[in-house]
DNA sequence: TACCGCATGTAAACGGTTACATGATTAC
DNA sequence: GTAATCATGTAACCGTTTACATGCGGTA
């Protein structure tokens, strides 16, 4: 059960899309920082070094005039195997929205049944939270607690709608690329 | 700009609701763990000790037979002042959903204009994310990225609907207690 | 017998941020 | 002149989790 995704594993997954430098990864993650955490360089570069030492990635150093050389990292065969091992194991039942989103971003590394399983797991978890919250709602609660609970319920319902929609398309034989609902 | 809420400040805020023991706080936070992080005892107890040393809370030790004594913490006058100082300062523009929810849970410590300001800030931030995402959507993106973005957009829209609703009620003169939308 | 709930606490380990260093180029 | 973009990296610091210690009562 992998509850927290270490940035090590996550950036390894990102490198399946294309070879990237640390700076590239940072820029990409910054564009998604409203959904997931964007690591600082202070954790990003050491993570890349660790992956390199474990043989999960390789580097190609591209010198530039008047600038430090770009170091382009590529995932290796061993890296892909290691990623598969991790990405296939089930999400923890208390996984946060961010943790789920990090896995979703790596959807390209999933087979269709695995993608369906990921979405179904999230559906079960969110509907479980909702059910338990509805039961607890009866009790007298403080203003702030009720506000936060109401907010959370609204978000959870939106999640379930999206998941139903996506799972519906997948079950009707849609290829993963057609799962995305138009905004 | 307080982006991250330290558990110190947060549990200080929780103590405005009622005096509680560390164990009580943990149980309450566990019930909300699908929305916000529930700290471990290893950070909860030291946080309580620190608040005590700073004079922001007081303890009342209640002995029990065959069990370690319960230590009930209460917020002091200084504690309330310190909390007010913190809770009034604006949220960081990159605040996460969790960070916002933590503030919302402490809504009872806010005046009505301050509550309105908190909701309006969240509204601006979320609609800003949405706008920027729509602009970036045009570009060719990977399956996982589009899935995650679609998911995030769905959640963000649900947030805006809830915020519009709550702000609408507040502007029509509803007291904070009536702001909660029926589920 | 073994585990869960109650109830507190500490120390080591871990993962991350912050702040620094380097240095050229372009823009306000 | 000051800041931002590009591009890499290190070290100190900080908050949190994990794992441990203690100990009784109820339950499966």
Image (tube, coloured by chain):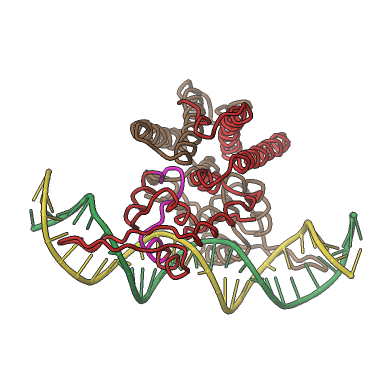
Chain colours: A brown, B red, C green, D yellow
Instruction: Determine the image quadrant of residue D19.
Output: bottom left
Q: Kindly tell me whether residue B11 is visible in this rendering.
A: yes
A66, above or below A172, in the image: below
Residue at the image point whose x is 45% and y is 47% from the top? A87
Span colored in magenta: B32-46
Q: Which is nearer the eye, A132 or B129? A: A132
Residue A68 x/y as whole percent: 75, 68
Residue at the image point whose x is 59% and y is 33% from the top? B163
B163, above or below A44, in the image: above
Residue A104 x/y as whole percent: 52, 41
Q: Which is nearer the eye, A111 or B8? A: B8
> Is A40 a magenta residue?
no
B25, above or below A139, in the image: below
Residue A62 x/y as whole percent: 73, 63
Q: Which is nearer the eye, A45 or A109? A: A45
D10, above or below A182, in the image: below
Residue B134 x/y as whole percent: 70, 34
**Secondary structure character of the magenta stretch overall:** loop
Where's the N terminus of chain B, which quadrant?
bottom right
Residue at the outermost front position: B77
Q: Kindly tell me whether residue A29 is visible in this rendering.
A: no
Residue at the outermost top position: A172
The total number of labels drawn is 0
């Amino acid at each position: 059960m992998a509850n927290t995704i270490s940035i090590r594993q996550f950036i390894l997954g990102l490198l399946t899309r294309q070879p990237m430098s640390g700076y590239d990864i940072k820029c990409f993650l910054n564009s998604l920082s409203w959904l997931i955490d964007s690591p600082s360089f202070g954790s990003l570069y050491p993570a890349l070094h660790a992956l390199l030492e474990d043989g999960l990635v390789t580097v190609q150093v591209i010198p530039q005039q008047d600038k430090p050389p770009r170091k382009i990292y590529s995932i290796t065969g061993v890296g892909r195997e290691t990623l598969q091992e991790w990405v296939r194991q089930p999400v923890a039942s208390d996984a946060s929205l961010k943790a789920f989103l990090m896995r979703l971003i790596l959807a390209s590394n999933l087979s269709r049944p695995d993608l369906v399983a990921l979405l179904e797991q999230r559906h079960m978890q969110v509907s479980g939270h909702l059910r338990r919250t509805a039961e607890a709602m009866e009790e007298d609660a403080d203003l702030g607690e009720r506000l936060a609970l109401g907010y959370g319920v609204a978000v959870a319902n939106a999640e379930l709608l999206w998941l139903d929609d996506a799972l519906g398309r997948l079950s009707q034989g849609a290829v993963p690329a057609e799962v995305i609902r138009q905004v």
